[in-house]
Image (cartoon, rainbow, N blue to C red):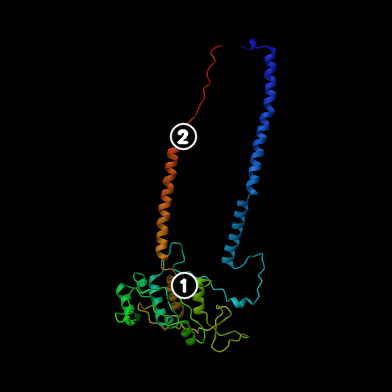
Amino acid sequence: MLSRLSAGAFRKAALGASRNTPRSSSVRFASSNASASAFESVMSSRATLASVSLFTAGTVAWYTHLYGSLPFVGEVHASHLSDEGLHPASYPWPHKGILDSFDHASIRRGYQVYREVCAACHSLDRIAWRNLVGVSHTVDEARTMAEEVEYTDGPNSEGEMFQRPGKLADYMPAPYPNEEAARASNGGAYPPDLSLIIKARHGGADYVFSLLTGYIDPPAGVEIREGMNYNPFFPGGAISMARVLFDGLVEYDDGTPATTSQMAKDVVEFLSWAAEPEHDERKKTGIKAVIIMSTLFALSLYVKRFKWNVIKNRKITYSPPVDKTH
């Protein structure tokens, strides 16, 4: 067959090869230039800049939330550091873990401490008697405690308000009728509502526990005016609330020794539950969701591999037509 080709045919073939060579190299250069330009466009886009900025700001915010300040940036304070209060230690609360739940026996004891000690000044507006059912008390116990309180209801058929025993649907009564009465009874200080106190204070349960157990005599050089008490965990060190927990102040029904730290731990556990009553159910639902989503994800991977395995592993060949003229 080669003997049939002329010299002119060989020259044309050589010229065609020489023309195709720079074209293929130019194609390779074009592909590399295109990938480089695509990378540069991605890096210089506004979306990338916004994503990097948000990631950096989030990292800094999370670090400062955990540790208080950045290690390479000095803190500037218009006041003394003692004005912010002593930072509380981290305690191993029973509900602190990802899969941990509240200590319900501690919640029951904590409610007893709240009822006998804290309820004289602090309200619990967001908790109803029915919320205690199945958590720390039975239905009969919660109904009996509710009926011990008189609630104003009405008007009746004669248009007058009347007093009635409490029901499970009623919310726990406040110690004072209004804020002015509360301030008048506490030397001008307003006792805060304790429904969300754990979430409303930096440090949460650790701060409240440290505050209840942190009353000490003021150190030398620190002057506390009359009617105030020294507590290093309170911002400024001077707090209107006096120490209220003392050993043996409450007699627990289950025989637990009522030490100051035990009562503080129990009432903080109760207030943690009051701030988040759905805590245990939320974790149960989260575990179920993780199990279901993981199972569905594994099944989707299997189905994907089963359906696409034939398509991805098939071999496509091309058999050009044979020229039968030669």
SS for dot 1: loop
Residue at x 56%, y 89% (from the top left corner):
226
In this orientation, does residue 257 appear? no
Camera-nearest residue between 23 and 150: 150
Residue 293 is situated, as x and y percent measured from the top left of the image, at: 42, 52
How far across and down, in percent of the image, does residue 118 sit? 44, 81
Q: Spot the residue most to the bottom.
A: 226
Pointer 2 and pointer 1: residues touching (CB < 8 Å)?
no
Can residue 81 be seen here? The reply is yes
Residue density around tag 2, few if under 14, some if 14–19, many if 20 or more, within 10 Å: few
125 relative to 29 in the view: left or right = left
Query: Mark 1 highlights which residue?
Result: 196
Residue at 44% over, 41% down: 304
Q: Quadrant of the N terminus?
A: top right
Q: Is residue 254 depicted above or below 102 in this figure? A: below
Helix, strand or loop for disc 2: helix
Left or right relative to 302: residue 49: right
- Relative to 137, does residue 97 appear above or below in the rendering? above
Q: Please tell me whether residue 20 is drawn above or below residue 207 in the rendered image.
A: above
Per the image, the residue denoted by label 2 is 311
Distance of label 2 from label 1 (alpha carbons): 58 Å
